[in-house]
Image (cartoon, rainbow, N blue to C red):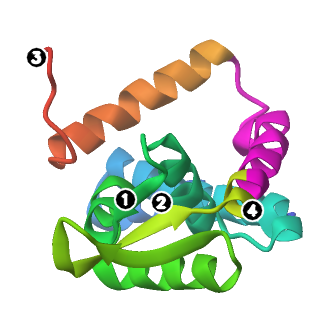
Amino acid sequence: MAKPLDLPFDPIERAAQIWARRFGPSPSMAAVTSIMRAQQILLGALDALLRPYDLTFARYEALVLLSFSRTGALPLRVIGERLMVHPTSVTNIVDRLSRQGFVELRRNPADGRGKLAEITAAGRSVAEKATRDLMTAEFGLSGYSSDELGEMFRLLRGLRLAAGDFTDPAP
């Protein structure tokens, strides 16, 4: 867990007030700054929960993605697309998981140049244990009701849709 800042004021609210005086009101500046800080807080909390398993959230996500696949194996390119990360990041994530014995790397039979990452029994086991801990901690969002979490998802889904992450099947 991240060390609490314990400031006597909300620094983002203060920044928004100063911003408004200098440049004009910008609720979007306050919102994006809050989102960025929330991401830092959540990533720190999730990584702390995963530390006993020698995982980061990025490596955990890769294991879960592989466990969701029909065969337990995916091309690195597909992992990158699904996790929405750069190919270099995928290589680093999968290489680390491979060194840990959580995935095996092998040639992709459908593409002689590409590689497949396949989850191992140890990878499945650690992903299941880590998932139990994350679920118990409600992924760091235990202070919100189901309705609030649904609204949060809906609002952020709109941002992701507008960014082109996916196409909406029901416009």
Task: Reply yes or no: does residue 90 show up in magenta.
Answer: no
Locate residue 68, reporting x and y percent. 49, 41
Eyeballing the image, is 100 above or below 33? below
Q: Which image quadrant: the N terminus?
A: bottom right
Residue type, numbered disc 1: Leu
Mark pair 4, 3: CA separation = 42 Å
Q: Residues within 10 Å of mark 3 (few under 14, many from 20)?
A: few
Q: Which residue is mark 1?
A: 74
Q: Which residue is mark 2?
A: 33
Residue 98 lies in what quarter of the image? bottom right
Residue at (58% x, 58% y) in the render: 63
Foreground mark, 1 or 2, reads: 1
Locate residue 133 relative to residue 82 in the image: left or right. Answer: right
Residue 79 lies in what quarter of the image? bottom left
Upstream in sequence: badge 4 or badge 2: 2
Residue type, numbered disc 3: Pro
Q: Which residue is mark 3?
A: 171
> So how many labels did they put on this image?
4
Q: Residues within 10 Å of mark 2 (few under 14, many from 20)?
A: some
Q: Evaluate whether residue 3 shows in this view.
A: no
Residue at (14% x, 21% y) in the render: 169
Locate residue 15, reporting x and y percent. 52, 64
Q: Residues within 10 Å of mark 4 (few under 14, many from 20)?
A: few
